Image (cartoon, helix red, strand yellow):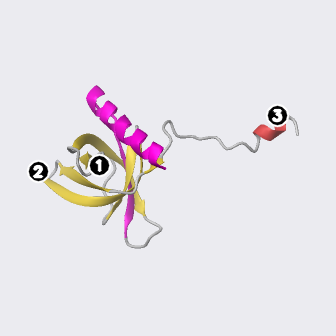
Amino acid sequence: MTGESMSMFAHREKRAHPRIPFWTKVKVHWAHPQNGYVESETLGVENISPGGILVETSKAYPVNIPCEVFVRKDSHSDEIILPGTVIRSVSSRRGSFFDTGISFPTLSPEQKVSLDEIIKLYTSAS
């Protein structure tokens, strides 16, 4: 097979950031600007990347709702707070849960470094 015909079968990653399996729990605070309260959930995580996180939620959340994700490198470290925005929330293949994608569009340089450290830790552990 020539290089040209082989390229038809090559898988291309369409994401800007590859997803890293990240089986842990995080706390998420969801902001509800229309009624002025914050809802909090502790959630299971499916994967994480420099651009966002996929969590399993008990209900669907509206797209564009702001939130904060509280994550730790390990059980001995301080929480890192990552501001995010819901980009999708769809029924999970696991039944009565929802796969909720959260992007991190406004991370500070310090938050980016902390997130990169978490990703490197979990990438080297797998």
Query: In the displayed structure, would residue 61 be above or below residue 16?
Result: below
* Whole-percent x, y for residue 51 in the image: 40, 38
| Residue found 42% across the figure and 39% down from its top | 120
Q: Is residue 116 visible?
A: yes
| Residue found 23% across the figure and 48% down from its top | 76
| Residue found 29% across the figure and 26% down from its top | 109
Q: Secondary structure at mark 2?
A: loop
* Whole-percent x, y for residue 40 in the image: 19, 57
Query: In the displayed structure, would residue 119 be above or below residue 88?
Result: above
Look at the numbered discs 1 and 2 and tell me whether their residues touch, using CB distance below 8 Å.
no
Q: Secondary structure at mark 3?
A: helix
| Residue type highlighted by circle 2 | Gly
Residue 74, disc: 1
Residue under pointer 3 = 4
How dense is the environment of label 2, judged by Cα within 10 Å: few (below 14), some, or many (20 and up)?
A: few
How dense is the environment of label 1, judged by Cα within 10 Å: few (below 14), some, or many (20 and up)?
A: few
How dense is the environment of label 3, judged by Cα within 10 Å: few (below 14), some, or many (20 and up)?
A: few
Position of residue 111 in the picture relative to residue 22 (left or right)? left
Residue under pointer 2 = 36
Q: Is 116 within the magenta?
A: yes
Q: Determine the CA span between mark 1 and mark 2.
A: 32 Å
Q: Secondary structure at mark 1?
A: loop
| Residue type highlighted by circle 1 | Asp
Judged by depth in the image, the label closer to the viewer, 1 or 2, is 1
Position of residue 14 in the picture relative to residue 41 (left or right)? right
| Residue type highlighted by circle 3 | Glu
Residue 61, disc: none
* Whole-percent x, y for residue 70 in the image: 24, 48
**Magenta residues (range):** 97-126
Q: Does label 1 or label 3 sit earlier along the sequence?
A: 3
Q: Does label 1 or label 2 sit earlier along the sequence?
A: 2
